[in-house]
């Protein structure tokens, strides 16, 4: 039965016992106060930053002291292009040996497979495909069938593969299947068939793309 309200007990609290006093240690009261946690949250964010300040930079890709490569070719549309026209972008170079349709397909599929591992660098990279072949119409039809005419895929005519062989000589890598040039046209890495070569190529590409100091202006040293 509910106790009746009285003038002396308008809330009807008669008979209700008071809560027992807290037996928790006094210091635990600070845990419920927001300002108590501020130093801990700050330390959580600050320690990684301090660790990064003390971290050492990786070894920069070799080749920053090289002279830029000189390449001047026409593309499959007849437009003349020089390497200096592409300053500001990384440049990946692969061959397209088009005299044999089967070899053309092998080269293109190898390029497409390699490119699939470089997608994170796509916005700062142009891909130069050096076409060695006489039937440019057949090459164009093949590329169209593969939907390979992308804005950053540039197809340059390299009669006899002369320019590609010159790059192999310049890199002292007669078995190289691809090359990486930095934003200023310096040869920085070679692509090969082994996984070690391919991983080294991608690592070099990542460093050049994300560490501006590893790709200094001509005549300047590598810097943090």
Image (cartoon, grey):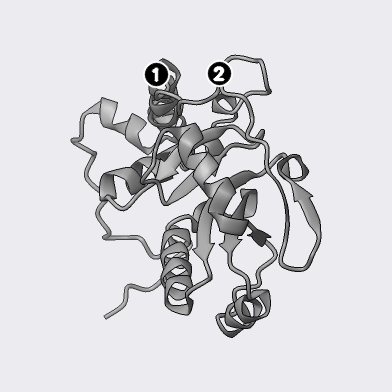
Q: Is residue 189 visible?
A: yes
- Residue 104 lies left or right of residue 155; in this view the side is left
Q: Quadrant of residue 43?
A: top left
Please report the residue visible at 60 percent of the width from the left and 46 percent of the height from the top.
Answer: 91
Name the element at disc 1: loop
Q: Is residue 178 above or below residue 49?
A: below
Of residue 215 and residue 81, the one placed in the foreground of this image is 81
- The residue that mark 2 highlights is 222
Mark 1, other Cα within 10 Å: few <14 / some 14–19 / many ≥20: few
Extreme residue in the left direction: 23
Please report the residue visible at 42 percent of the width from the left and 59 percent of the height from the top.
Answer: 114
- Residue 20 lies left or right of residue 198; in this view the side is left
Q: Is residue 92 visible?
A: no
Residue 72 in the image, given as x and y percentages of width and height = 73, 46
Of residue 115 and residue 81, the one placed in the foreground of this image is 81
- The residue that mark 1 highlights is 56
Quadrant of the frame with the C terminus? top right
Residue 111 in the image, given as x and y percentages of width and height = 46, 63
**Label 1 vs 2, first from the N-terminus:** 1
- Residue 159 lies left or right of residue 195; in this view the side is right
- Residue 87 lies left or right of residue 131; in this view the side is right
Q: Is residue 102 above or below residue 80?
A: below
Quadrant of the frame with the N terminus? bottom left
Q: Are marks 1 and 2 in contact (CB under 8 Å)?
A: no
* Residue mark closest to the camera, 1 vs 2: 2
Residue 93 in the image, given as x and y percentages of width and height = 54, 51
């Amino acid at each position: 039965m509910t106790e009746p309200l009285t003038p002396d007990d308008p809330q009807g609290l008669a008979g209700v016992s008071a809560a027992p006093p807290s037996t928790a240690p006094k210091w635990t009261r600070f845990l419920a106060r927001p300002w108590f946690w501020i130093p801990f949250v700050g330390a959580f964010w600050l320690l990684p930053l301090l660790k990064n300040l003390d971290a050492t930079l990786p070894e920069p890709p070799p080749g920053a002291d090289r002279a830029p490569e000189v390449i001047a070719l026409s593309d499959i549309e007849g437009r003349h292009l020089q390497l200096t026209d592409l300053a500001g972008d990384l440049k990946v170079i692969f061959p397209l040996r088009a005299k044999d349709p089967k070899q053309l397909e092998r080269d293109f599929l190898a390029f497409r497979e390699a490119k699939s591992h470089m997608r994170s660098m796509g916005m700062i990279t142009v891909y130069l495909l050096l076409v060695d072949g006489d039937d440019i119409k057949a090459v164009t039809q093949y590329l169209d069938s593969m939907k390979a005419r992308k804005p950053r895929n540039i197809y340059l005519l390299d009669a006899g593969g002369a320019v590609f062989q010159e790059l192999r000589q310049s890199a002292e890598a007669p078995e190289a299947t691809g090359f990486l040039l930095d934003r200023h046209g310096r040869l920085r890495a070679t692509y090969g068939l082994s996984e070690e070569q391919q991983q080294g190529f991608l690592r070099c590409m990542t460093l050049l793309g994300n560490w501006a100091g590893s790709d200094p202006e001509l005549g300047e040293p590598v810097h943090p």
